[in-house]
Image (spheres, rainbow, N blue to C red):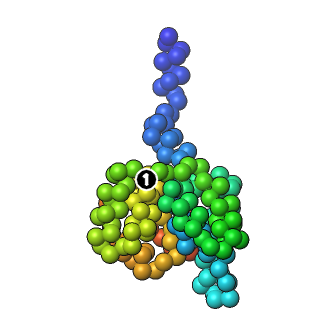
Amino acid sequence: MILQKQLFEEIELIPAEKICNSMIKNIIYLDTCSLQRPLDDRSQPRIYLEAEAVLTLLRLVEAEKLQLLSSDVLQFEISNIADFNRKSEAQLMLKLAAHIATIQPNIRQLAEQIIAIGVKPMDALHAAVAIENQVHYFCTCDDKLLKKLKTLNFNQQTKFLSPLELIMEVTE
């Protein structure tokens, strides 16, 4: 018993929350326009850079450095893409997701609040899914949407970023 006590006094104990937090992978949510960005015409520098950023994020998900969250909203939007190749590619990207979030009543309620600040209904659902599922990073290529979402104060955990901002954030 004395030996055991002595051993514990010599070991520097690490708080459990530090261990847990260091093991948690950042969870990202890519909205439909972000998932589609690698499939866009890359002749414009911004589109090229954003496409490469999204592809890099997906490689980090494959390498298990990040976790991707999908949702019923993403699956619905992607299922309605007319172009077969774009739809197929986006569906392949979504297969990397660790989880698929379903639309619950609390998500609908939050989406209504987000709509009230001028966000389109589908975009509001994407944002509400991310917030309610405590996603670390929500990514969109839509500048107007991003500007509105950055004014939200619903959740300190979810950051709203462009693909370029996100890649800088997760690769520091």
- Above or below, 112 against 103 in this view is below
Q: What residue type is labelled 1?
A: Ile
Q: Quadrant location of the C terminus?
A: bottom right
In the displayed structure image, the side of residue 69 where residue 82 appears, left or right:
right
83 sits left or right of 116 in the view: right
Q: How crowded is mark 1: few (under 14 residues within 10 Å), some or many (20 or more)?
A: some
Image quarter for residue 118? bottom left
Q: Where is residue 70 in the image (x, y as percent from the top left)?
A: 54, 56
User: Can the viewer see residue 91?
Assistant: yes
**Residue placed under numbered mark 1 in the picture:** 103
Q: Nearer the viewer, residue 166 or 81?
A: 81
Q: Residue at x 67, y 84 (%)?
A: 41
Estimate the x, y position of residue 89 in percent, counting from the top left.
69, 66
Total number of numbered labels?
A: 1
> Residue 3's spot in the image, x, y percent?
53, 14
Give 23 or 120, whichever is nearer the viewer. 120
Secondary structure, mark 1, is loop
Residue placed at 62% from the left, 58% from the top? 94
Residue at 42% x, 76% y is 145
What residue sits 69% from the left and 70% below the top?
84
Placement of 166 over or under 100, stated as above or below = below
Residue 107 image-quadrant placement: bottom left
Question: In this rendering, would 162 be left or right of 64?
Answer: left
- Most distant residue in the bottom direction: 44
